[in-house]
Amino acid sequence: MAQNKKSIWEPAEEKVRRLRLLDKAPNSIYNRLVVRYPYQTDSDYARFYFDSAERLAGTFDGNSEDDMLLLPFLMLYRHAFELELKSFIKELIRLRKVYLGHSGLDYSAAELAERLRKKHGHRLLPLVNEVQKHWEELEYDEPFPEEVAELLEMLHEMDGSGMSFRYAGHLPDYQNYVDFPDLVEMLNEAKEQLDAAYSYAVGSYDAMPTLRELM
């Protein structure tokens, strides 16, 4: 066998930008391996951040050192919600175009991502408001879960710009005494309700013919 044969794990395109930091830690032992896959979506990233937040929360044991968990935990959860809402908006817009033929929604994937970036940035409240707007346009039998909207509004109040959990000086100058397991449960319940709403929104149209199929 030729010694210069390329590994199947190497990028096929020679000009692909290399990630030097990750290349500096090449894996050679399977049980030490983590993989960064290409072509992942905002929804995939949201799941990674949700799962990472839950794994971080799982290290809590009630010691004073656990105070350090709070802001990283909130940052992970907040970012996961942001990505999930953006993914949800993209899917709801697709449903409106494909099944209902609503006009003014002919964005490419890149255009829609840019629109969300410019219009909403990292702000949770405008994102959940847009989800609710598309939800109403699609006329679902079930309402969008109010508990999710309320929790996201409270999270937005704490961190409207996406900076308050990342940098000092953005939160009020007083101490909070938080029941951490209760906080974890509240956020996890909202995540599960949002996941259920996402599945319901898509599943409600899965069995229906698209406008193109009706032509």
Image (cartoon, helix red, strand yellow):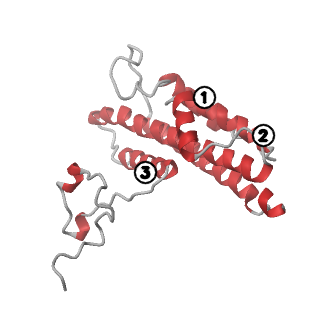
The answer to whether the residues at label 1 and label 3 have Cβ atoms under 8 Å apart is no
Q: Amino acid at mark 3?
A: Phe
Could you say which disc has been placed on residue 126 in the image? 1
Q: Residue 87's image quarter?
A: top right
Question: For numbered disc 3, what is the local secondary structure?
Answer: helix
Residue on which disc 3 sits:
48
In this rendering, the answer to whether 94 lies above or below 1 is: above
How far is disc 2 from disc 1 in space, using C-alphas? 17 Å
Dot 2 or dot 1: first in sequence order is: 1
Residue 85: image location, x then y, percent: 57, 40
Q: Residue 24's image quarter?
A: bottom left
How far is disc 1 from disc 3 in space, using C-alphas? 23 Å
Residue 215: image location, x then y, percent: 84, 61
Q: Nearer the viewer, mark 1 or mark 3?
A: 1
The answer to whether the residues at label 2 and label 1 have Cβ atoms under 8 Å apart is no
Residue on which disc 2 sits:
137
Circle 3 crowding by C-alpha within 10 Å: few under 14, some 14–19, many from 20: some
Question: For numbered disc 2, what is the local secondary structure?
Answer: helix
Instruction: For the N terminus, give its image quadrant.
Output: bottom left
Outermost residue, bottom side: 1
The residue nearer to you, when weighing 54 against 99, is: 99
Circle 2 crowding by C-alpha within 10 Å: few under 14, some 14–19, many from 20: few
Q: Amino acid at mark 1?
A: Pro
Tell whether 213 sits left or right of 53.
right
- Identify which residue is drawn at 41% across, 19% down: 171
Tell whether 113 sits left or right of 147.
left
- Identify which residue is drawn at 57% across, 28% down: 119
